[in-house]
């Protein structure tokens, strides 16, 4: 670590300490909330642009109709599927996305998640990204949480935390952020699982749009409760005093 350039040392140290503090504060998160790999995949697609409570209602409907299997979703009509997942919002779009995934699963892997899981991480990631409606966050969620493959999931909470603590700029891309975690940590699916889940918990409990920094377990980690932007909550250092505020 001492051979790393100073900026990288700082990022590394931040990411290591943030994990320790979050784990100490919240404990294990036991993610993902889903009973089977297929349920996790369906949840990962349905959770786009909605909260988890709505996804749970949609999944309950699918279970109640006994269609939460690849075979049943392959056979069900898209309109019936859309009606069942209505609570998750954007139900026509999401029904199409679920169908796209299922069609791909049957075309490439005879409908078998076990066969799909046997693909190498890098290959499967590229393949998932070719399915219409599956972007990087959904693909990584499927890979990590349904198939236990060591890929880091980045979401809006991750970017918000790192931006507010001066680790990234506002225009950092998904892959910029993913690379940070995958550079500084051993690629371990259990660890990536826990770290992402802890960041989501942080985002829900403290690092909200209007941050609750006074109570937050990370408020002494490269952060100042006094010197921060009142609008976007970014810590203000010499280099970020004139930052271009994410809120403006
Ligand atoms: S201290 Fe504030 S900005 Fe930092 S993670 Fe906590 S809530 Fe977010």
Image (spheres, rainbow, N blue to C red):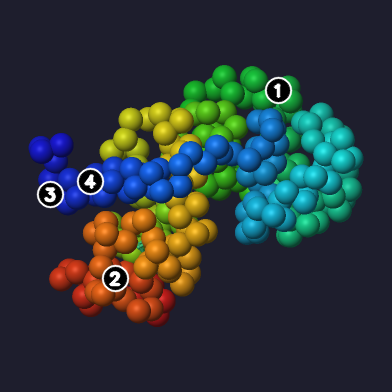
State yes or no: Cβ of the residue under disc 2 lies below 8 Å from any atom of ligand 1.
Answer: yes
Residue denoted by label 1: 112
The mark that comes first in sequence, 1 or 4, is 4
| Front one among 65 and 200 | 200
Secondary element under disc 2, as helix, strand or loop, is loop
The mark that comes first in sequence, 2 or 4, is 4
Q: Is residue 210 left or right of residue 85?
A: left
Residue denoted by label 4: 13
Q: Which mark is in front, 3 or 2?
A: 2
The mark that comes first in sequence, 3 or 1, is 3
What residue do we see at 57% from left, 28% from top? 147
Q: CA distance from mark 1 to mark 2?
A: 51 Å
CB atoms at circles 3 and 2 under 8 Å apart?
no
Residue denoted by label 2: 225
Q: CA distance from mark 3 to mark 2?
A: 24 Å
Q: Quadrant of ligand 1?
A: bottom left
User: Quadrant of the image for the N terminus?
Assistant: top left
Q: CA distance from mark 2 to mark 4?
A: 20 Å
CB atoms at circles 4 and 3 under 8 Å apart?
no
Residue 118, percent across and down?
57, 19
Secondary element under disc 3, as helix, strand or loop, is helix
Residue 194, percent across and down?
46, 38
> Quick check: 105 above or below 203?
above
| Front one among 17 and 99 | 17
The mark that comes first in sequence, 1 or 2, is 1
Residue denoted by label 3: 6
Estimate how packed mark 4 is, as few (under 14), some (14 to 19) or many (20 or more) residues with alpha carbons within 10 Å: some
What residue do we see at 31% from left, 76% from top? 229
CB atoms at circles 1 and 4 under 8 Å apart?
no
Secondary element under disc 1, as helix, strand or loop, is loop
């Amino acid at each position: 670590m001492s051979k790393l350039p100073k900026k990288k040392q700082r990022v590394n140290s931040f990411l290591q300490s943030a994990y320790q503090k979050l784990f100490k504060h919240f404990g294990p998160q036991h993610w993902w909330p889903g009973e089977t790999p297929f349920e996790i995949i369906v949840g990962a697609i349905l959770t786009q642009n909605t909260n988890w409570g709505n996804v749970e209602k949609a999944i309950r409907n699918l279970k109640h109709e006994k269609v939460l299997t690849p075979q049943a979703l392959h056979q069900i009509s898209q309109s019936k599927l859309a009606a069942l997942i209505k609570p998750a919002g954007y139900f026509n779009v999401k029904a199409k996305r679920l169908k796209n995934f299922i069609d791909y699963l049957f075309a490439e892997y005879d409908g078998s998640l076990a066969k799909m899981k046997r693909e190498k991480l890098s290959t499967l990631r590229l393949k998932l990204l070719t399915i219409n409606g599956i972007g990087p966050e959904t693909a990584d969620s499927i890979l990590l949480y349904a198939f236990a493959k060591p890929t880091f999931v980045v979401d809006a909470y991750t970017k918000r935390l790192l931006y507010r603590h001066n680790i990234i700029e506002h225009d950092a891309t998904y892959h910029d952020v993913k690379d940070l975690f995958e550079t500084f940590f051993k690629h371990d699916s259990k660890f990536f699982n826990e770290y992402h889940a802890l960041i989501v918990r942080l985002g829900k409990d403290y690092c909200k749009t209007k941050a609750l920094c006074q109570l937050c377990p990370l408020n002494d980690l490269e952060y100042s409760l006094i010197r921060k932007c009142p609008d976007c909550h970014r810590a203000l250092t010499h280099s970020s005093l004139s930052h271009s505020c994410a809120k403006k």
